[in-house]
Amino acid sequence: MPVITLIRGDGIGPEVVDAAVLVLDALRAGLEWDVVPAGFSASAGELLPAAVRQSFERTGLCLKGPLATPIGTGHASLNVALRKHFELYANLRPISNLPGVESRFSGVDLIIVRENTEGLYSGIEHEIIPGVVESLKIATEKACTRIAEFAFRHAREQKRRQIASVHKANIMKLTDGLFLRCARAVAEKYPELDYREIIVDNACMQLVLNPAQFDVLLLENLYGDIVSDLCAGLVGGLGLVAGANLGETHALFEAVHGTAPDLAGKDQANPTAVLLAGEMLLRHIGQFAAADRLHAALLEVYREGKVLTRDAGGQSGTRAFAQAVLEKL
Ligand code: NAI
């Protein structure tokens, strides 16, 4: 029986995670949950709480709700700490339309592959003299090659046609230059995949004009973070997009969204993103039939369009939506 570390998270986290667990349990896929304390506030000030670390070390699998990180002050991000500690170097975010959800585009079918361990997320910031601060962007050949290999391997497995490296190597010639050089070297081993490069600002514009021209996007950490939310917006918003954080030995699944303080405690958040994260987890552990059933039930609820949360154009709450998916199962 696979045991999964479960972090319910902050803000809307407990609401959407509980709704998703209700549905995942109904699939009878034999998942067993090891629930560990959520958020910084619950962890007595430890950045990576011992209970979380020990559980995830043991299980190798985690489903996680969003965790709050204070802006401009306070503690560092527990999300980043988890990704670094367990070397979850690849952040994989499939983004596609759901039937019945009105959005800017139809036919969006993108995969975002984001480097998850370095770049400006290295957290190396300091004050040189009052009024002058510095943040270091780190790029290593090892991490750039590793993420490029992941992206190309995944694209081949998923029978994709194209990979675009998104960069700003015209300005950051060394760091983003290294990222591109590593991607080009890996691209040579995959002649069947069309390889292109695009500067990040142009990539953003092209994505909002014509997302269908892209297939798999390969990005360093910060661009990957920003472009993910942009792409979520193309298909109807953050309530609908999930991601996997993958390393050699450990895998963590979560929604792309954060704690949504504006919705917390109101039974309004959309649990779809966490449900899709659960689906990715099921596929990761080889439970394909359960993943397919979950996907079909979700699509049916969207196709019917009777019980949808507000972000997806409906009037229903988190719990009612989960109940509707359960009924389809
Ligand atoms: P956010 O993703 O929490 O919210 C952005 C917008 O999307 C809000 O309008 C929100 O209502 C909406 N939204 C998000 N999830 C939704 C859902 N499930 N259903 C319907 N609408 C949804 O981003 P924000 O406000 O920038 O960040 C809030 C906090 O979350 C910060 O402390 C941030 O550090 C944290 N965060 C955590 C993440 C994680 O744990 N992986 C990822 C992103 C942010």
Image (cartoon, rainbow, N blue to C red):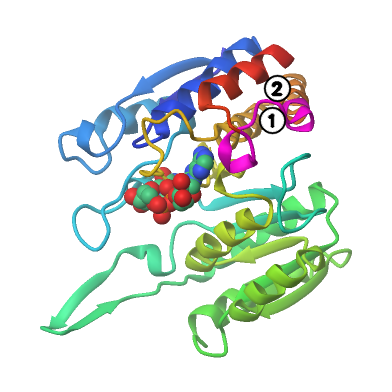
Q: Is residue 294 above or below residue 193?
A: above
In the image, what residue occupies the spot 39% across and 63% down? 121
Residue 93: within the magenta? no
Label 1 – label 2 distance at C-alpha: 5 Å
**Given the image, on which type of amino acid does mark 1 rest?**
Arg
Q: Does label 2 point to a residue whose CB lies under 8 Å from ligand 1?
A: no
Q: Quadrant of the N terminus?
A: top right
Q: Residues within 10 Å of mark 2 (few under 14, many from 20)?
A: some
Q: Residues within 10 Å of mark 1 (few under 14, many from 20)?
A: some
Q: Which residues are magenta?
A: 300-314
Horizontal side of 59 relative to 111 (left or right) equals: left
**Given the image, on which type of amino acid does mark 2 rest?**
Gln
Is residue 60 among the parts visible in the rendering? no
Front residue (pair 187, 168): 168
Where is residue 70? Give x, y as percent: 26, 53
Give the total of numbered labels.
Answer: 2
Q: Quadrant of the C terminus?
A: top right
Front residue (pair 146, 49): 49
Please tell me whether mark 1 sits on a helix, a strand or a loop. helix
Front residue (pair 172, 241): 241
Where is residue 192? Give x, y as percent: 89, 64
Q: Are marks 1 and 2 in contact (CB under 8 Å)?
A: yes
Where is residue 249? Give x, y as percent: 52, 38
In the image, what residue occupies the spot 81% across and 68% down? 213
Please tell me whether mark 2 sits on a helix, a strand or a loop. loop
Q: Which residue is mark 1?
A: 283
Mark carried by residue 287: 2
Q: Is residue 117 above or below residue 137?
A: above
Q: Is residue 239 above or below residue 271?
A: below
Where is residue 33? Give x, y as percent: 46, 17
